[in-house]
Image: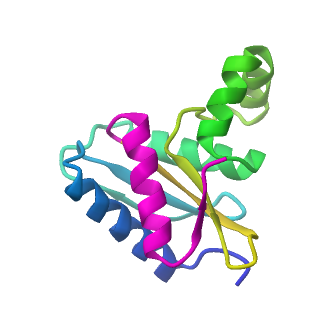
Amino acid sequence: MNTVSLEQALVIIQGALNRAKEVSAAPLTVAVLDNAGVLVALQRQDNSSLMRPDIAIAKAWGSIALGRSSRGLAEMAAARPGFMQSLNTLGEGKILPAPGGVLIRDENKRIIGAVGITGDLSDVDEACAVAGVEHAGLQADCS
């Protein structure tokens, strides 16, 4: 397996939405990208606001593009805002440095994709992303 499959992406989304229900999260949007940053699957819960798909994709895309979670990107942005702004310019605005974007690793720790979630507090988004990845039997990387 070199990249996340559609079947895995759908399991990740279902696991994330299951966790969201358990914690009474606000309506979420979940995007799963492959290891090339291409959208594999996206689901938006009822009443999720208009920009949520773009936000979820940006959290995941930034993670893939830079090889670290969007939490790690947020930490980088806080420490080096000018650098992050330059990276986002190079990435044509596709990077959103806020928790909720998690790398998906296979059993050999290779990056096979990323999941991005938005709709609730960033920590809740991230927890749902981790739950989704683990629901699929894969490893979530929040570093």
Q: What residue is drawn where x is 36% and y is 34%?
A: 121
- 60 or 103, which lies in front? 103
Look at the picture and state if 69 lies above or below 90.
below
Magenta region includes residue 142: yes
Q: Is residue 53 visible?
A: no
Look at the picture and state if 136 lies above or below 74.
below
Q: What residue is drawn where x is 18% and y is 44%?
A: 47
Residue 27 drawn at (x, y percent)? 24, 46
Magenta region includes residue 14: no
Q: What residue is drawn where x is 72% and y is 16%?
A: 81
Q: Residue 78: which quarter of the image?
A: top right
Left or right: 101 in relation to 68: left
Q: Residue 1: which quarter of the image?
A: bottom right
Left or right: 20 in relation to 115: left
Residue 82 drawn at (x, y percent)? 78, 15
Q: How many numbered circles does the render carry?
A: 0
Q: How is the image coloured?
A: rainbow
Residue 134 drawn at (x, y percent)? 48, 70
Q: Residue 79: which quarter of the image?
A: top right
Look at the picture and state if 12 lies above or below 33.
below
Look at the picture and state if 76 lies above or below 17.
above
The region drawn magenta spans 119-143
